Image (tube, rainbow, N blue to C red):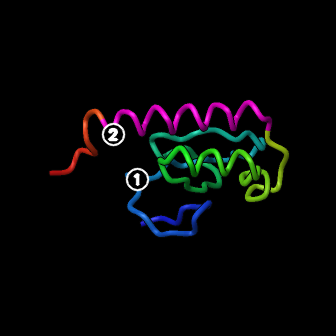
């Protein structure tokens, strides 16, 4: 279980995406959850990604200015993952 940075809810890791900041202050999406660096989790819901974008949540969490392009990429990634889950299910039976 991990905490969604936007809603504050605890959710299973597979329902979240990890965002990581490395030592060089580069922020990226970490689909594997294994990149080294400081991580924060976001729900795989488009509304959560858009809220994070609007409020620039990860700027606050990591204490750095993050380019708007990152947030655009994040919304696209979450939208894609949500669509995949709708098509193929979440992998549990």
- Residue that extends furthest to the right in the rendered view of this protein: 65
In the visual, does 92 lie left or right of 40? left
Assess disc 2: are there few (<14), some (14-19) or many (≥20) residues with their C-alpha within 10 Å of its C-alpha.
Answer: some
**Residues rendered magenta in the picture:** 67-86
Q: Residue at x 56, y 48 (%)?
A: 47
Q: Which mark is residue 15?
A: 1
Identify the residue at horizontal 77%, vertical 41% (top origin).
24
Residue 58 image position (x, y, % from top left): 72, 52
Is-magenta flag for residue 85?
yes
Residue 22 as seen in the image, left or right of residue 89 = right
Secondary structure beneath label 1? helix
Q: Considering only vertical position in the picture, is 49 above or below 75?
A: below
Of callouts 1 and 2, the N-terminal one: 1
Residue that appears at 70% across and 34% down: 70
- Density class for disc 1 (Cα within 10 Å; few <14, some 14-19, many ≥20) is some
Which one is in front, 65 or 84? Answer: 84
Q: Please, is residue 30 above or below residue 10 in the view?
A: above
Q: Is residue 90 left or right of residue 4?
A: left
In this rendering, the label closer to the viewer, 1 or 2: 2
Q: Between marks 1 and 2, how big is the CA–CA gap? A: 10 Å
The x, y position of residue 50, in whole percent, is 64, 45
Q: Which residue is mark 2?
A: 85
Residue 69, percent across and down? Answer: 74, 30
Q: Which quadrant does the N terminus fall into?
A: bottom left
Between 90 and 65, the one lying in front of the other is 90
Magenta-highlighted stretch: main secondary structure? Answer: helix
Q: Nearer the viewer, residue 11 or 29?
A: 11
Q: Secondary structure at mark 2?
A: helix
Q: Total number of numbered labels?
A: 2
> Residue farthest to the left?
93
Q: Residue at x 52, y 66 (%)?
A: 3
Q: Which mark is residue 41?
A: none
């Amino acid at each position: 279980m991990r905490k969604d940075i936007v809603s504050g809810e605890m959710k299973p890791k597979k329902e979240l995406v990890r965002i990581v900041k490395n030592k060089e202050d580069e922020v990226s999406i970490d689909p594997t959850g294994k990149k080294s660096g400081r991580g924060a989790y976001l729900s795989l819901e488009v509304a959560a990604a858009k809220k994070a974008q609007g409020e620039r949540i990860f700027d606050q969490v990591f204490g750095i200015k993050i380019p708007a392009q990152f947030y655009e990429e994040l919304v696209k990634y979450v939208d894609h993952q949500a669509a995949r889950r709708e098509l193929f299910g979440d992998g549990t039976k």
